[in-house]
Each structure stands twice: as C-alpha cells, then as structure tokens.
Amino acid sequence: MKSSIFTKLALGAVMAMSLGMAACAKKGESSVRVAGRGGNVTTSSTCSTGASAVGRIYGNGNNFEQMVKIFVSTTLPGTSFGTIDSTGKTSNGVFLTANLRFDANGKVDKTSSKMLIQIRDSFVGQMDNGKEIQPYEVQFTSAYDGTLNKNNRTFTITFQDELGWIALSGTYDNTNAWGTVYFQNYKTVDGSSTAQQTMGSFWVPSCGLFN
C-alpha cells in the first residue's frame, strides 16, 4: 500500500492523540474492554441486510504475528497463542467487526460505538483438559474518540482504557472500509513493549461499520 498524504496526516494525528490518552489513563479510567477466549460478545456481526459484517486485520508475515501477540499481552502472554495467519485469507487469523455511530457533525457517539477483534490462532479447536480451545476475543464496548468526514470519506476511531488504546484510521466507500490499525499498551503481563505499534492493515464491510 502506497503512503499517501492522508496516511501521513492520520498517523500524525494518532501519535499526537496517544500522548493525551496516556495521561488520561493514569487517572484511572474505567475499563471498556472485555478480553478472553470465548467471551460474551454484543458487537453485531451482521449488516441490516443480513450480510456478514466481519472483516480482517492482516500484515506482513512474522512481524504481524509478533504485533498481535504484543497487543494481547495486556491480559495473556504471547506464548499462550499458536501461529496467527497474516494474509487475512484463511480461517486462521485476526477478524474485525465494528459498529460505529457518528452525529451529524461527524463526532463519534462514544457509548453507541463498539469494536470486536477475534483472534483465531492455531490452538483454536484443539482440546485442553477436556475443553475445546475457543478464539481469543477483545471487545471494546465504548469509544474514546473519533471523527467521520463524509466529504472525504475518511474516519478515525479510538478505543482506550487503563490497559492501553487501539485506533483505526482509514477511508471507505459504499462496500468496504480499509486503513491501518495502531495500538499502544500501558501494561503487559509478560514484559512486552509498551511503545506505540502498527498492528497492520484492515478492511471491514461498510454496511456493518456505519449502519
């Protein structure tokens, strides 16, 4: 994917935003994420038409897997996961569903916006102590900040709590939205990096994202 002016501006905005979010998190914000293998998911995975609203997050080979394992290290060590597909084209990998709401001025409706990241690593489906291993899911139940520009068809959305933040920055058409996923952990259970990271790229059906 070629670097555009929009991409550079979006990255700059996300980096600037991270400084303020880190300060807020230290004041003890309540958690907005629910994480674990096999969770109680409320983010809708279908569009109003009944079509799937599930997209993918993908990246570059081993580096992508490393980034995903850093992301989950807020709650589980990366060694708790098997291999994670980076192509976004197999049943193994990282799946994305988001239901975002914006007002007429393009400002995010925080309490009505949700996002679900589901990680299906190579351990999923195997048996452990008589139980089948489920996908690892991270659901964010309210947004921290976000904007939508309908003229340029661009958007940025950020979810944040005391464990860290994750942001999507991208563009969209009538079919799909696509862009880049950034994140930063404030705490980890295995000593992983707490620096800002780029997880990879994403795409998700527009019908589920905005409707």
Image: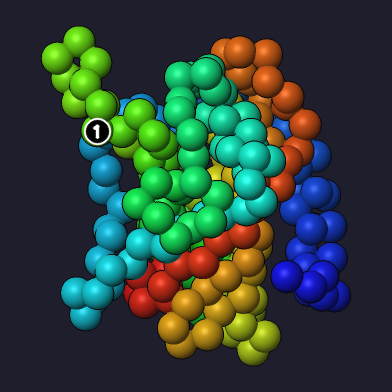
Q: Quadrant of residue 11?
A: bottom right
> In the image, is residue 152 above or below residue 116?
below
Q: Judge left or right: residue 71 versus residue 152.
A: left
Q: Is residue 18 above or below residue 147?
A: above
Q: Position of residue 88 (x, y in %)?
A: 48, 58
The spot of residue 101 in percent (x, y) is 44, 66
Relative placement, left or right, of 192 versus 79 is right
Residue most toward the left? 130
Q: Residue at x 38, y 41 (%)?
A: 120
Quarter of the image that includes the N terminus: bottom right
Residue at the spot 36% in from the left edge and 77% down from the top edge: 207
Picture colour scheme: rainbow
Residue at (57%, 30%) from the top-left corner? 69
Q: Nearer the viewer, residue 160 or 207?
A: 207
Q: How many marks?
A: 1
Element class at badge 1: loop
Residue 190, visible in the rendered structure? yes
**x and y, in percent, of residue 210 in the image:** 42, 73
Q: Position of residue 86 (x, y in %)?
A: 55, 50
Residue 98 seen in this snapshot:
no
Residue at 64% across / 89% down in the picture? 151
Above or below — where is 151 with respect to 134?
below
Which quarter of the image is occupied by the C terminus? bottom left
Q: Quadrant of residue 131?
A: top left
Q: Amino acid at mark 1?
A: Gly
How many C-alpha atoms fall within 10 Å of the one at disc 1: few (<14), some, or many (≥20)?
few
Q: According to the image, label 1 marks what residue?
A: 125
As drawn, is 118 to the left or to the right of 76?
A: left
